[in-house]
Amino acid sequence: MRPGEVLNLERGCSAYDETTGIWTLTGRHFKGVKDSDGNKIPEGEERKDPWTVIDVVAGAVDAVERLHDHQLLFPVHLDPANPIGALSDRPGEARTSRDTPRDIAAFITWVNDFCQATGLSEAIPPDPHGAIAPARFRRTLAWHIVRRPRGLVAAAIQYAHVCTQVTLGYSGTYESGFPDEHAFEEWLARLDQLAEDERLLDAGEHVSGPAADRYRHRVREGNAKFAGRVLTHHRQARDLVANPLLQIYPGRAMTCVHDAAKALCRVFTNQGSTRQTPDQDDCRPSCQNIAYTDRDIAERETRAQELRLLTADVLAPSPRHQRERAELQTLQNIIDTHHRGREA
């Protein structure tokens, strides 16, 4: 949710569906809301689809509702430093995004003072990135989706008990505006990845596999073209992240140098974009888009060692024994080919 959407939530906005076990919030949204003549509607409009949330959020809404009798969850009149009379020149009733960083800082101070007075250890440490502004919460969610393997699942884990459908519903439509945050964070992650990949290539990392040459080319050219580039709009991030030079996807003990024409997996086309991405859960060993870095081979060697121990079990059922021996042989062939290429 955008900060303005949160600050305009009203009493009774949360609801629980007994059938699905899902909590939702209803509220207003403002971005892109226009009348039939194309004029912006300042008061926004009721969001067609409610936000899906977790029970912690519903509990927070309930707590705020018990703090006061105002219709808005975050009314401006709760600020003891600014009595109502001092705000008579301001027509709005809700707190503003400008107030929120100060509110958060005051809350952190209150918690830390309480912990110190009562001897509790749950004090909130200083944030290394400075004051906490409300816009950072959306970027935090985008960061965890992009920077963690299997992003959607990682988002669910990061936010503890969040069903994956929360993330899908949240980022699945451009009405939410969240794909902009996701694209920008993905752009930054790709640049970080390219920089690290080039550093390792310069340090002598070997790359094998059918897509090894494409991998080296994209890493070098991608860094030369995009390193240090400054973006001024989310639209630029969405366009640039689709550049072929950036289509490198680290996977489980392999790296996909994606070319849709050669892909053997399922290929997805992103909503509202011509960009195509691979389904890494459907990766095929014979695909021409695969490359193996030394990091990938290290993972395969670990797995190979596990399989050697399993295949040494003489009491294992024959079907399992044969399956594990076949997997071990496949892994060993990839490992041996990689090391031979280094020696050559």
Image (cartoon, helix red, strand yellow):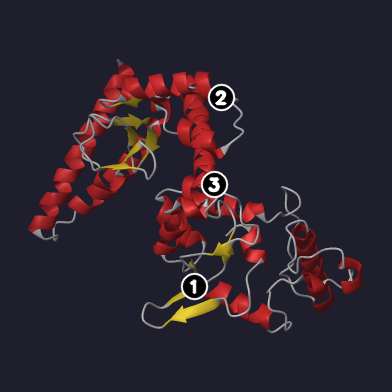
Task: Estimate how packed mark 1 is, as few (under 14), some (14 to 19) or many (20 or more) residues with alpha carbons within 10 Å.
Answer: some
User: Secondary structure beneath disc 3?
Assistant: helix
User: Secondary structure beneath disc 1?
Assistant: strand
> What amino acid is found at the position of numbered circle 2 in the picture?
Ala
Q: Which mark is residue 227?
A: 2
- Image point (59%, 26%), residue name: 229
**How many marks on residues?**
3
Side of 72 where 327 appears, left or right = left
Q: Earlier in the sequence, mark 2 or mark 1?
A: 1
Spatial CA distance of label 2 from label 3 is: 20 Å
User: Secondary structure beneath disc 2?
Assistant: loop
Which residue is denoted by mark 3 in the rendering? Answer: 181
Side of 75 where 27 appears, left or right = left
Looking at the image, is 8 positioned above or below residue 64? above
Q: Which mark is residue 159?
A: none
Q: Nearer the viewer, residue 33 or 250?
A: 33
> What amino acid is found at the position of numbered circle 3 in the picture?
Glu
The image position of residue 188, as x and y in percent, is: 54, 37
Q: Earlier in the sequence, mark 1 or mark 3?
A: 1
> What amino acid is found at the position of numbered circle 1 in the picture?
Thr
Looking at the image, is 339 positioned above or below residue 83? above
The image position of residue 148, as x and y in percent, is: 47, 49
Task: Estimate how packed mark 2 is, as few (under 14), some (14 to 19) or many (20 or more) residues with alpha carbons within 10 Å.
Answer: few
Which residue is denoted by mark 1 in the rendering? Answer: 24
Can residue 204 be seen in the rendering of this structure?
no
